[in-house]
Every structure is written in C-alpha cells, then in structure tokens.
Image (tube, rainbow, N blue to C red):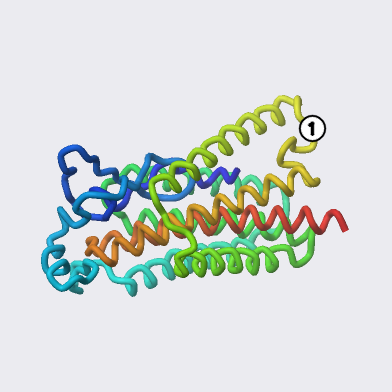
Amino acid sequence: MRSSNPVFSRRGFSRDNGYAGFNTAPQAGGAAVGTQGNPYAQGDPYAQQGGNPYATNPYAQQAQQYGAPPQAPVSTGRMTMDDVVVRSAMTLGTVVIGAVLAWALLPVSSTSYGLAVGAALVAMVLGLIQSFKRKASPALILAYAAFEGVFLGVISEMFNTAWSGAPFQAVLGTMAVSGATLLVYKAGWIRVTARYARIGLTIAIAFVLVMAVNLLLVVFGVAEDGGLRSMGPLGAIVGILAILLGAFFLTLDFKQIEDGVTYGAPKEEAWLAAFGLTMTLVWIYVEMLRLVAIFNSSD
C-alpha cells in the first residue's frame, strides 16, 4: 500500500442519532463519533439512524417548522462548497506543482528513488501530525501536499520510463473513478450509513494487514516478485480491490463535505475536507499507476 497514506482515523463531523452536528455533545443513550483524514481505517463515523435527527442542530427547529431539511445560514464563519473547492484546488495544485518540478529536475536514478522514498516518509509524518491535531493547519496540509507531489513526480517519471504514457493513463483513470463515484453518490445509489461504513472499514483494515504481512514476506525473501503485489494477474486483482477501497473512501469524503456544508461546519473544516480528498485521490492514482503498468506488461 502507499506508504505515504497511513491515516487510520478520520476527524470530522460528529453525529447524533444519525445526523451531523458540530461541537455537539452526545445525547443520552447515543454516542457522537468524530472522524477525519483519509483511508484506511477508522471508527464508526455514522451513528444509527433514528430518534430526533436535529436534536443538537441550532437551525433544526426552524427547518422542522417548514418541513425542510436543516440548512445552516451562510456566513463568513461557516464552511461552504466554494470553500471546499478552493482549498481542494490549492492542495491538489500543490501536489501537481511538486510532481512537475520533481519530474523535471530529478532524473531517473537510484538517488531520485531515495529522494522519493524520503519525501513519502516526510509526507506520512506530516499527514499523521495533521490527523492527530484538533484543528486544521493549512501550512501543514500544504507541506504534506508538496512532499507528496515530489514522491508522485519521481515515481511517475520512473513508470513513464518503463511504460510510456502510464502516468497520463493513470490520471485519466483516477478522474474516471472519481467522477463515477461522485455520480453514483449524488444519484443516491450509495447511502453512507453505519453498516456501509463498518463493512467497508473492516475490508480496508483487513487489506492493510494483509499487505503489511505481504511486505514483510517480500523483505525477508519468503515471497518472490512482490508476492500479492506482483506485476501479474494476482497483482492486478489486488490493485483493483485497492482502487475500489479508494472509491469507498471517496464516498466518505463526499458525505463529510455534504454534512459540513448542510449543518454549518466551521470554515476551517474545509481544509480538513481538502486534506482527506487529496489523500484519497493520491491513493487511487498510485494504485491506478500500478494497474496500468501491469496491463501494459501483459501486452
């Protein structure tokens, strides 16, 4: 799995009886669970549906009087979709700039590979620090994006040297997966419920553990040619599963953003939404890059 995406918890929007609230305490008999970050394991972020869904929402009573869904009034202190779009563009733009510079300035060599590994480790540490912070740190998130970009730029150049055009195909594949996931989510074909999250997270945790064991077997020479991460059919199956897990976490990201806008999250939460989206999209891109290489190798 991508070493630079180690976050196993999502800090985000607490829920009370199934609907989001911010800075709220749990009701009696219920629990509010906070979530954040990106893939790839976390507690149950979605409480069971039922009861009064707007018990802790300051705008709930007004919304219920008119039979409308709760909607926080727009103000400078509340997160909006524009905030999420702008922060995501800044974060992903930093990744792209870092990747372009690394590709242009670092020729394919053992030295550049070492720099890529180092950048990935730094990105991992920065991602962990942000994940454990109670508030978003724009500087920390952008620094994470920059180091992630260096990592992606070097490995993309390496893949392009071995399989010409692989990065471009991986970008198109990542866009296709993201677009399809958003379409399915907005169409209501997927409902992000407690059961949905638990099943997906259980599979994700199992995947991480299996990949960790596989890595140890490869390092100690027990498994050859990458084991489950080989460049053959088995590696392709594992890659497809990894991309599906990435799509799963995209749905959690979309739900987090939707709830944040609907229920009036603090404006700073837009940075956390951008952080989570960036981690998930990078995960999908790396897995797509490997999958493209596998398919090209079989030709």
Residue 18 x %, y %: 28, 51
In the image: residue 58, left or right of residue 148: left
In the image shown, does 13 or 86 lie closer to the viewer?
Answer: 13
The residue shown at (45%, 43%) is: 7
Residue 296 x %, y %: 81, 59
The residue shown at (21%, 49%) is: 51
| Above or below 112: residue 218 | above
In the image shown, does 274 or 81 lie closer to the viewer?
Answer: 81
Disc 1: which residue:
224
In the image shown, does 219 or 71 lie closer to the viewer?
Answer: 71
| Above or below 224: residue 36 | below
Q: Splitting the image into 4 quarters, where does residue 72 fall?
A: bottom left
Position of the C terminus by quadrant: bottom right
Residue 53 x %, y %: 22, 55
In the image: residue 282, left or right of residue 42: right
Position of the N terminus by quadrant: top right
Q: Splitting the image into 4 quarters, where does residue 227 fall?
A: top right
| SS at circle 1 | loop
User: Is disc 1 surrounded by few (<14), some (14 to 19) or many (20+) residues within 10 Å?
Assistant: few
Circle 1: residue type: Glu
